[in-house]
Amino acid sequence: MPIAPPGALRRLIDDVGPVDAIGVEERVAKYATRSIKKKSKLFGLKLAVSMIDLTTLEGKDTPGKIASLCRKAITPHEGMDVPSTAAVCVYPAMVKHAKKHVTGTTVKVASVATAFPSGQAPLKTRIAEVRAAVGDGADEIDMVINRGAFLAGELALVQDEIAQVVEACGDATLKVIFEASELETYDNIRAASFLAMRVLRPGDFIKTSTGKTSANATLGNNQVMIEAIRDFYLDTGVAISMKPAGGIRTAKQALHFLIAIKETLGDAWLHHSRYRFGASALLNDLLRQIEKERTGAYQAPYVFSDATEGY
Amino acid sequence: MPKTPVKKSAPRRASARELVFGDLWEFDPAPETADPKLKKRYDLFIGGEFVAPKSGKYFPTISPGNEAKLADIALAGAADVDAAFQSAQKAFDGAWGKMAGSERGKYIYRIARLLQDRAREFAVAETMDGGKPIKESRDFDVPMAAAHFFYHAGWADKLDCLAPGRRVAPHGVVGQVIPWNFPLLMLAWKIAPALAAGNTVVLKPAETTSTTALKFGEILQEAGLPPGVVNIVAGAGETGAAVMTHPLAAKVAFTGSTEVGKIIMRSLAGTDKKMTMELGGKAANIIFDDAPLDQAVEGIVNGIFFNQGHVCCAGSRLLVQESVAATVLAKLKRRIAVLRVGDPLDKNTDLGAINSREQLDRITALVQSGVDEGAEMFQHACKLPAKGFYFRPTVFSGVTQSHRIAREEIFGPVLSVLTFRTVEEAIEKANNTAFGLSAGVWTDKGSRILKMSTELKAGVVWANTFNKFDPASPFGGYKESGFGREGGRQGLLDYCKLI
């Protein structure tokens, strides 16, 4: 059993600087007071659509559901001037089905791998899963970090595993999921961000959550991570991308997250190559709001296809 | 650390290492549209009625956001001030002075609730009249004003517990003069404890911001407060002097500049009037190298740009430990780049208008002195509205203790940055000022916070936060920042005599 150097996590936090939880909450509360109207609202809504990793991660997923999901990702709403989503996000077994449908479009196939969501499988197995997904055509891999090792202070182990997954990805983009709620504190989330970014490539992502625990993406953990991305970029010139996932269900929430980006990382991150939403229900709420801006009235929910719900 | 493969497709931007806060996603105007229900003309509020001034004179009040005239305000002369005091004395000798505390409390609760009911209307009026951003008047000024009335309403029937072993009694008629930076909130800070303790009041709002105080007269009428318990007289310095020196004033309370405070104290020397003074400040906001820097930067911004820096406890001197000074300054500039300066009524505005042309000129002159004396100036590169009084968020670095901008209260969005090496130097520099109203300490180390809070000569010391207020927390100064406290048990005691 590897022995963690004493105080490794503490030293990493000292190295990257602490975070004051109350201060973070106060900062992000200001995003929610921004009032986004008219053209700026429409711009934000469409931007959010273009950033979605349209996701289904259920044991009961079928190739038929994946087909429906891909169709929705390519054309979110028939006859509406709205971009495709950035990607679909599926389990490795579904990658080859998804790939068939999105080939020739801008929609990418992202796959969770590394024994998602717990990560509790031997490293060999996790790496093999990544290679299999990439082999089946995944453009992007969403991995989970070894939270147990992180909290125990075995930071080198966590970082080595990320580096090995980076290698297994080849040309595929990597998204590193921290499962922020399991890291417990903002200090830990900031430390984990730096730990991962130091072995990532420009354009790789750090990601808040799996969406499989009770607490997912929040404006707070999003803020801590994008501040880490900012500091790392200014320090090294390496631009890391960001993906909050889980719990973002409404257009209003999505706009708050985008305002956080606008005011923390600036215009260069207001693009799906630098920012994504891991979500499913969010898409239809965005479409509903876009249609409301156009017609002045809210459409009934059944007007928008439930492509992520059926099987 | 393993070598990281570089993706072929990945964008490499290592050369251009600055963030772009551009116009890719500009926000459309989002004006607050609630009706402030302003009248064209405001009379004096004396004896429970709005009455025309005996002087017959009115003066215009304008909106500093666009220089448009809002209303005419009655100018109270010496005769009007006297009428107000006579009416207050009558109320004190009559129903109000004999009323049980539990009954007084009901009136104060009613005032608090009515203020909440009309919160949006008052917020818009406050923003139009004073220039502060609507989000501050909506989320801070008006709710906090109501909170002060609620807090003190609760005290009205519990005065027996205020000073254990002693009994307390009201002074009688209290003369109060308040400033223009938080017109309604300062009114609440003054009137709520005075009423809770059983006093009656003659209050003069600042010349440029009388509107919400006179609107508040409408709330007093609605609450059915007995006539004369609160009287509101508008006007400039002369009216204020008449309020402060009136023979019937048993106690006077003043919030404003140190300069005017000194004049008042001179004029009252030799009288037996009780006094409380809440005057200027030049607070040190002290950042240690182990502080959570991003949150500290947020605290710096809250400290100096809240209400355009028109805050007596504003963190206008930033003391930053030299090992993190460059980092903090860079972070601060990036944060300032996304502050939105402009129309106070726009819900997205972070910094609104400077309260008056006079204040704008004062800020401009002091900033010029900073440039002349060799400090390095950074200003937000934003566009300012063509009409109205606006000033860019400004940061001076390379400031020393002897610069005017480090010693004088600017009362605007202007921050002076100094550095320090040791804890002792931080304390020495922080205390090297004629003022002593507030201070801030940012560090991850609890013991250092405790040490600093005992060594800093300031009435309020905030730790890892800034500009936090609560009705239960006493507020007031050391040295030339004044004496007496407002808020909490201590503030209420200043409105009572011990018997």
Image (spheres, coloured by chain):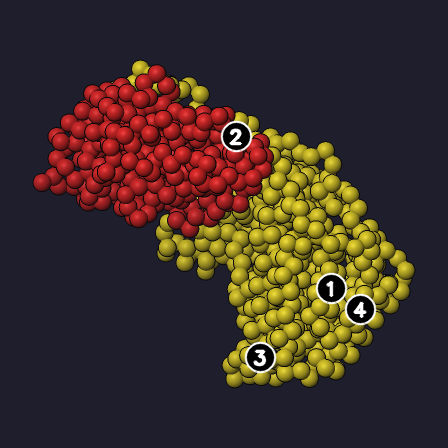
Chain colours: A red, B yellow
At 41% from the left and 38% from the top, the residue drawn is A282
Disc 1 marks which residue? B218
Q: Name the image quarter holding the N terminus of chain B.
A: top left
Residue in front for this viewpoint, B325 or B337: B337
The answer to whether residue A214 of the structure is visible from this angle is yes
Residue holding disc 2 = A43
Query: Which is more foreground, mark 3 or mark 4?
Result: 4
Reading the image, the residue beneath label 4 is B49
Q: Residues within 10 Å of mark 2 (few under 14, many from 20)?
A: some
Residue positioned 49% across, 33% down in the render: A45
Sequence-wise, the earlier of marks 3 and 1 is: 3
Identify residue type, mark 4: Glu
The amino acid marked with disc number 2 is Phe
Q: Chain of mark 2?
A: A
Dot 4: element: strand
Q: What residue is drawn where x is 52% and y is 84%? A: B165
Identify which residue, B40 or B256, lies in the foreground: B40
Same chain for mark 3 and mark 1? The answer is: yes
> Chain for mark 4?
B
For residue A243, say whether it is visible: no
Whole-angstrom CA distance, mark 1 to mark 2, is: 44 Å
The residue at which mark 3 appears reads as: B157
Label 4 vs 1, first from the N-terminus? 4
Q: Are marks 3 and 4 on the same chain?
A: yes
